[in-house]
Image: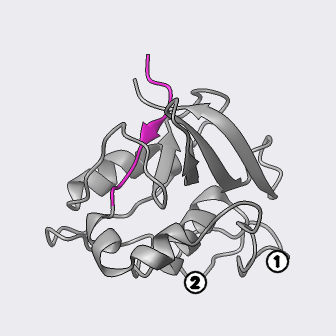
Amino acid sequence: MKKIKILITFALLFIIFPAQVFAWTYPDNATGYPYANSPEDQVDQWNTYTRNCTSYVMWKINQAGLPFNNNPTGPNGNSVTMSHAMYWDENASYIGYTVDNSPSVGNPVNWEANSHDAGQSGHVAWVEQVHTNNTVFISEWNWNNGDGRYNERDNNVVGD
């Protein structure tokens, strides 16, 4: 049974921008998200929708130093529309990012549609901390029944 699928290991980011990747620590994770007070579901600068999980994670990826939007070209030269969160693992893999079930700070995680309380479009969040028992602390947007708000959760189980 799939619990949470870890998405996109930005290996090059750890080499090029190690301080930035590890600089995000609890409790200041929401600070700076440019659409925190905007109306919901407006098209944002990454071609996703404001105050949704995909918009928040696009912002986190860009803050990590990787230019990324809803229509990225990956390291292998392929392009894709990232679309709903449930497709992020497959789409990231298609464009050349490593996708696995090993949690890593400074990387997205995604849930498939209707799994583990994710809605019909799935969900994507950001790994802030990994604990020794392989659970993770995440930051996210729009988790609680699509409320359009920031949220943090701890002790999330990852892997198959």
For the record, the magenta segment spans: 1-9
- Residue 69 at x, y percent in the picture: 44, 75
Report the residue marked by disc 1. Answer: 38
- Residue 55 at x, y percent in the picture: 60, 67
Does residue 43 sit above or below 148 in this rendering? below
Q: Is residue 95 left or right of residue 42?
A: left
Which residue is located at x 65 percent, y 34 percent? Answer: 155
Which residue is located at x 63 percent, y 57 percent? Answer: 53
Within 10 Å of the Cα at label 1, are there few (<14), some (14-19), or many (20+) other Cα atoms? few
For the N terminus, the image quarter is top left
User: In terms of depth relative to the viewer, which is nearer, 117 or 136?
Assistant: 136
Label ID, residue 45: 2
Q: Is residue 29 left or right of residue 100?
A: right
Mark before the other along the chain sequence, 2 or 1: 1
Please, what is the three-letter code of the amino acid marked with disc 2? Gln
Q: Is residue 7 visible?
A: yes
- Residue 42 at x, y percent in the picture: 71, 74
Residue 6 lies in the magenta stretch? yes
Q: Is residue 87 left or right of residue 63?
A: left
